Image: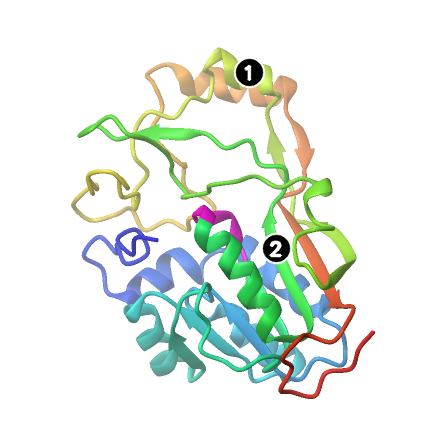
Amino acid sequence: MSNAYWSNFRGMTVDAYVEHFVNASAVDRQRMQETAAALPAEITTLLDVGCGYGQFLRVVRDMRGIAGTGVEITAEKVEYMRRALDVDARIASVDALPFSDCAFDAVCALEVIEHLPLDEYDKGRAEMGRVAGSWIIVSVPWRERRRNVKCPACGCAFNHNYHLRSFHDSDFPSLFPGFALRSLSSMGERRAAPAWIEVLGAWRRRELPPFAVCPACGFRRTGPAEQTPLDAAPAGGRRKGATQLRKLARHLFSRRTPCWYLALFERIGLPEHATGPVVAK
């Protein structure tokens, strides 16, 4: 997977980006706190795959006393986590985790697997199952209706969050071979429009969001980004006149839906080449 999007800070320092766009997000803080609270009590070691800027590692350390390890593909993020948060962060990809079999009690992938191209998606799930001793914890967007933006340079249409798949309840039981789905719940709340409104084009995305990078030609917006929390910023530009229509449609027809799934999987048998202390369930 290209690293261009994940390392696009629009000229900001990583510290400034985290302060204005990550730490300011109350929605993400609540999501991470709910996830930490849901971890089984026996977990003492944890790997956070695609750990971003280390916020969840800090939350589980503060809330649960777990000194976790994180992996990220972006060097700037790893350097920030080591320096600013004093966490064990390493450069690695989910499809090639540099750890032994069953090295951790639990492996977490929070808002990660929806981003993975097909080959990485298959290999990454296998790698997570290999290094997880007992538990895999995953969060993904809840029944997402993915929409695309269009690159003004080459015309490529792509999801502005780089989400390559959507998840529904039926997708989870078979997600990790050798693991049983023990819990599937929802987190957060948002207002969602009916599909027919989107078909009419009321919320059709036109412009690139602030940090999007075209996966085909590499086009990106330049200049300073507006310093607003990402969960409060618009996801993309709108056609002229669409804003009032969007507000009216949202008021009349939208309904409250969850933001994310939270799924907990437990190992149900001994792995083929276990090297750590694993107890078969």
The residue shown at (78%, 57%) is: 183
Question: Magenta stretch: residue 111 in it?
Answer: yes
Residue 57 at x, y = what percent?
A: 53, 74
Question: Magenta stretch: residue 59 in it?
Answer: no
Q: Foreground residue, 32 or 263?
A: 263
Residue 45 found in image quarter: bottom right
Residue 197's disc number: 1
Amino acid type assigned to the residue bearing label 1 in the image: Ile
The residue shown at (77%, 72%) is: 269
Q: Which residues are magenta?
A: 110-118
Residue 55 at x, y = what percent?
A: 49, 69
The residue shown at (42%, 59%) is: 22
Q: Foreground residue, 123 or 54?
A: 123
Residue 105 at x, y = what percent?
A: 66, 79
Q: Identify the residue under disc 2.
A: 139
Of labels 2 and 1, the one closer to you: 2
For label 1, the crowd category at 10 Å Cα-Cα, with few meaning under 14, some 14 to 19 and many 20 or more, is some
Which structural element holds mark 2? strand
- Please count the marks in the image: 2
Real-space CA distance between mark 2 and mark 1, rounded to the nearest whole angstrom: 27 Å
For label 2, the crowd category at 10 Å Cα-Cα, with few meaning under 14, some 14 to 19 and many 20 or more, is many
Which structural element holds mark 1? helix
Q: Is residue 226 left or right of residue 116?
A: left
**In the rendered image, which quarter contains the C terminus?**
bottom right
Q: Does 95 sit above or below residue 241? A: below
